[in-house]
Amino acid sequence: MPSLSRLELQHFRSYRTAALQVKANRVIVVGPNGAGKSNILEAVELLASLRSHRTTSDGDLIQLGQACGWIHGWIGTDGLDHIGLHLHRGGGRQGWRNQQPLSRQVDLLGSLRCVCFSSLDLALIRGEPMVRRQWLDRVVLQLEPVYGELLSRYGKLLRQRSSLLRHHGGKSLNHHLTVLLDAYDQQMANLGARLHRRRQRALLRLNPLAQQWQRTLSGEQEILGLLYRPGTELLPISDGDQGNQGLVVWQGALRQQLARQRKVELQVGCCRVGPQRDEVALQLNGQAARRYGSAGQQRCMVLALKMAEVELVTQVSGEAPVLLLDDVLAELDPDRQLLLLEAIGQQHQCLLSTTHLERCIGPWRRDAQCISVRQDEEGSVLSPLSGA
């Protein structure tokens, strides 16, 4: 099981420098709010997924007053696999493996897998469709690292095509514009259908796992449903057509719908068809979860989604991901805290942040490594927690 054996930071968030030697499968990071606990977990998440659940701007990740920062991690019990990510305030990233620069940062993906639980995850239920798309994208990235490249290429095409639509907004179609849009539509259809297929495939596998976790966490009282509502009208594909034949059908559908929407898109200046308009609909007992579920039920649904993600990543990769629990115990009642900690068991390496150590029940924290976080004049400081 790939696991984190050491983490080093420089000019990352609130840390001038920090080093954490991981000595146990469970690491509890304890400190007051604002001390820098979440920053440790966020650094691990970035190394594993190249993404943060807290920000999309690399500038937010670099310590104030600094031009750059970096994260380095050593993977495995022997620590022989060394990976790093260097961040620059002016933009651009550099991935490293075993002291060698990588030509693409996406080549870091797959070295370390993680699933992050955070109080911010309630936005999965209450937030806009983009939040659920981003969550599903993170799941697919854990399963298929090549997905990151597909997303990047599609995003670039989408921005270029939208810019073209805005530039010609209000104008009538001419031959030159038609040829340009035809070329964009062909490329977007090819990539968009591949994104649709991977998202749908992941959600079909997540759904039964999430349903089982919801039943467990609710005492068999609640049924959770995940529905994929693509931003393109797609014909159902049978199991036998999930390969290239089905993909060609979806590419044709996307290309035709882009062509049909062309005049309207010239008026509004944006693309109205494609995976950027996907929605993941969450239902509880057949009703829309964001309107029907109470705050407690919504927290339970998020927990079921995350545990389903853990289970699916483990099934597909054959490796248990590192779990990052960012102050989530405060969001759960005691019974669900116990269920979560028991579900984690010993098979997963886990980093957990909390303001109060007593929230971690005795049996679970007995063999844990406890780290204290405090602030001094230079930033956040890590130290072993005595008496834990």
Image (tube, rainbow, N blue to C red):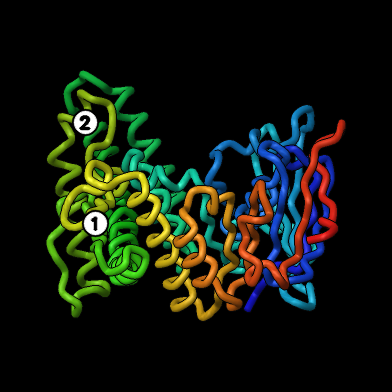
The kind of residue on which mark 1 rests is: Tyr
Q: Residue at x 57, y 56 (%)?
A: 325
Q: Where 365 sits versus 70, above or below?
A: below
Is disc 2 placed on a helix, strand or loop? helix
Is 33 on the left or on the right of 372, as rendered? left
Q: Where 159 sits versus 241, above or below?
A: above
Circle 2 sits on which residue?
Answer: 265
Circle 1 sits on which residue?
Answer: 228
The mark lying in front, picked from 1 and 2, is 1
Q: Residue at x 64, y 72 (%)?
A: 363
- Neighbor class of circle 1 (other Cα within 10 Å; few <14, some 14-19, many 20+) is some
Residue 14, located in which quarter of the rendered image?
top right
Q: Residue at x 27, y 47 (%)?
A: 293
User: Is residue 36 or residue 70 the one in the foreground?
Assistant: 36
Q: Residue at x 73, y 57 (%)?
A: 84
Which quadrant of the figure contains the N terminus? Answer: bottom right
For marks 1 and 2 on the same chain, the one whose residue lies earlier in the sequence: 1
Residue 49 in the image: state x and y as whole percent. Answer: 56, 57
Residue 246 in the image: state x and y as whole percent. Answer: 20, 69
Which quadrant of the figure contains the C terminus? Answer: bottom right
Is 127 on the left or on the right of 34, as rendered? left
User: Is residue 211 or residue 4 the one in the foreground?
Assistant: 211
- Neighbor class of circle 2 (other Cα within 10 Å; few <14, some 14-19, many 20+) is many
